[in-house]
Image (cartoon, rainbow, N blue to C red):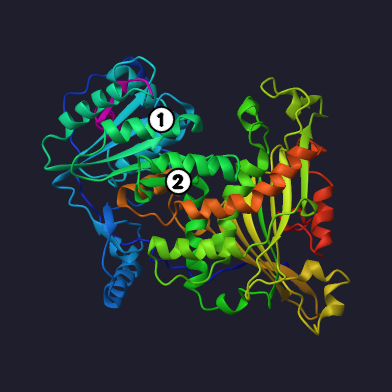
Amino acid sequence: MPALHSMRLSAQVLTLSGKVAQRHAADHQPQRAVCRQPARQHHRLRVQAAQSSAPSASTNGSGTATTQSPEIEAAEVEAAAADARQNGSPSFSNMKVYGLQEENWEKAALSIVVVGASGDLAKKKIFPSLFALYYENMLPQNFKVYGYARSKMNDEEFRDLIAGSLTCRLNDAGDCGKKMDEFLERCFYQAGQYASEDDFAALDKRMADGESEQSCADRMFYLSIPPNIFTTVAACASKAASSKCGWTRMIVEKPFGKDSESFQELSAALYEHLREDQIYRIDHYLGKELIENLTVLRFANLVFEPLWSRQYIRNVQVIFSENFGTEGRGGYFDQYGIVRDVIQNHLLQILALFAMEQPASLDAEDIRNEKVKVLKSMGQVRLEDMVLGQYRSRTTRGTTLPGYLDDDTVPPNSITPTFAACSVFINNARWDGVPFLLKAGKALANKAAEIRVQFRHVPGNLYRNKLGLDLDKATNELVIRIQPNEGIYLKVNNKVPGLGLRIDTTRLDLTYKSKYQATLPDAYERLILDCINGDRRLFIRNDELEVAWEKFTPVLKEIEDRGVQPELYPYGSRGPVGAHYLAAKHGVRWGDLAADDE
C-alpha cells in the first residue's frame, strides 16, 4: 500500500506575546569616527562572508517599559491582536498586552553594565545578544554598554575582545559590518575591583558623562560573576552606581544557593541593597521560544483545556539531555551536581508553567502567583522516587570517551551525579495521581530538551485488535520540543490509505524551521530585552525559589549524608538502567527512548 505522508498542523498558534508588527526606524549613529583595528577588520570580513548564507528574517520593532500600567481595556488587547494577525512579524512595542508602561526613550538614556565582562558567559552570550538586539533595532536610541571587570584594558582592547564573538545571523538589507562598528562604538570598558565602592564610583562618573545629554537615565547591571560575590557587587553597585533619577535593575545568574539555608542567606543579603522589583533572577531556559509559547498553546487553544487534567493525561515527562560531558568544567559542576544545576531550577520552572491554572491576566505577578501555587501543591521529593547516575568512560571505534572522573578538575572518587531522574506529584484537583517524571543527564546519546504529555488509553477501544498487544505504542502523545529543531507534534492513530484496514501512528507536526521563515532569537536576547522593558514574567520571584528549595533540600541532604553511590552508565548511552525501573514503577515508559521516536 502507498506510504502515508506526514500530516501537518493546519492551524498556526497566534500569540499576543508582544508580537505586533510596528517597525521602528531608530537611527543609531556612531559617536565618533571608527578607528579600525586589525582584529576587527579580520572579523568583519568573516561576517560579510557568512552573511550570504544566513537565513532571512523580518526586522523587528522596538519598545521598552519600566513600570506596570493600569488595567488593560479589552478593546486595546483585541486591536493589538488584530494588528498582530495582519502583520505577523514579532515586535515588543505593544507593551500594554503585558500591563507594562513604555519609557520615553527620546528623553531617557540607557546604560547597560556587564559585570564580569571578560568572562566566558559575557563573551559567548551577553555581548552577542546585546548586538543582536541592536541589529534588530530593539534597543533605545540613547544606549551605551559598559564592561566592568578586574582585567586591565582600554576601550579599544575591550572592543576587539568582544568583536570576535559578534555575528550577524540575520540577512538584512543593511550593512552588517557597519552595524557592528556602530555597536562597538557604544561599548566602553572600566577596570575595577568587585569589592571597591571607589571603583564603582568611577564607573558611575563615566556613565553620567555619557548620559548627560538626556534628562534622565536608566541603568541595568548584568552580574555575570561567581555567586560568592553577588552580594558584594550588589552592595557596591547600588551604593555608588545607581541611577539618580531613573530605574536601576540587576540581572542575577543562577545558582541561587545550594539549599534552603544558603538561598535564604543570599536572598537576605541582596535585600539589604535591592528591592524585589530591582532583582531579575534569570533562568535562561525560560527565555526559550517554546517555553514562551507554552502558555499560548494551552490558554489560546480551546481544544487543550479540557484535556489538560488527570482525566485524560496519564503522565507528563520533562526531559533534558546533553550528548557531552563536563569537558573541563567539572570543578564547578562537582559543587552542585545535576539535581541542583538542572532539575531544581530549569525543569521545575517548566513544570510550574505547564501545570499552572490560567492566571487572572498576563501581568507578571499573576503568572508567578499561579506558578507558586503549583510548587506549593507539589509533594516532597523522596529518595525512593529518584535515580542517580554518573557517566563512565567508553571506547567505541577506537576512540575513548572520557568518564566524569577522568576530568582533571573533578575530585578523585567523586560521587556527584551527572544524571538524575525523579517522579513528583502535584496534589490538587487537576493533577492528583498524575506522575510528573523529570530527567536530566550529561554524556547521553542525544542532545534534547522536551516536554512529553502521554495521554490515557482509549477506553473500550474498537481497534485494539488492530493496534497490537502493546497499547502504549498507540497512545496519543503531545511533544513540545524545546531544542534542538524546535517544534510541537501530536501522535495520532490513522488508517493507512488502501482497501484493507491497517492502522498507523503518525504525527500532526509543527516544526518551526519549516513553518516560520525566521531565525529564533536566543534566550538571552529575550530576557535582556524583558529586563529593559520591566517585564518580569520569565524571571523567578523569591518565593518561587523558596518553595522549590523546600521541596528538594531534604532529599539532597539525605543523598549527601548517606553518601549515595550513583549508578554508572557509559558515555553516549541512554543513561542508567534504574531510570527505566523508575518509569515502570508508575506504569509508563520514557517517551524519548521509544524506538519509533526519531
Residue 104 within the magenta-colored segment of the rendering: no
The residue at the point 68 percent across, 74 percent down is 310
- Pick whichever, 557 or 77, lies toward us: 557
Q: Is residue 116 above or below residue 382?
A: above
Q: Position of residue 322 (x, y in %)?
A: 66, 41
Query: Does the rendering let one see residue 347?
Result: no
The quadrant of the rendering that contains the N terminus is bottom right
- Could you say whether the residue bearing mark 2 is in a helix, strand or loop? strand
Q: Which residues are magenta?
A: 175-194
- Could you say whether the residue bearing mark 1 is in a helix, strand or loop? helix
Q: Is residue 64 above or below residue 368?
A: above
Q: Position of residue 449 (x, y in %)?
A: 62, 50
The residue at the point 76 percent across, 58 percent down is 596
Q: Position of residue 128 (x, y in %)?
A: 40, 35
Q: Say what amino acid the circle numbered 2 marks.
A: Arg
Q: Say what amino acid the circle numbered 1 marks.
A: Thr
- Pointer 2 residue: 281
Residue 183 within the magenta-colored segment of the rendering: yes
Location of residue 30 (image quadrant): top left
- Circle 1 residues within 10 Å: few <14, some 14–19, many ≥20: some
Location of residue 175 (image quadrant): top left
Disc number at residue 539? none
The residue at the point 56 percent across, 60 percent down is 352
Q: Position of residue 526 (x, y in %)?
A: 40, 49
- Pointer 1 residue: 232
- Circle 2 residues within 10 Å: few <14, some 14–19, many ≥20: many
The residue at the point 63 percent across, 72 percent down is 428
Q: Nearer the viewer, mark 2 or mark 1?
A: 1
Q: CA distance from mark 2 to mark 1?
A: 16 Å
Image side of residue 140 versus residue 576, left or right: left
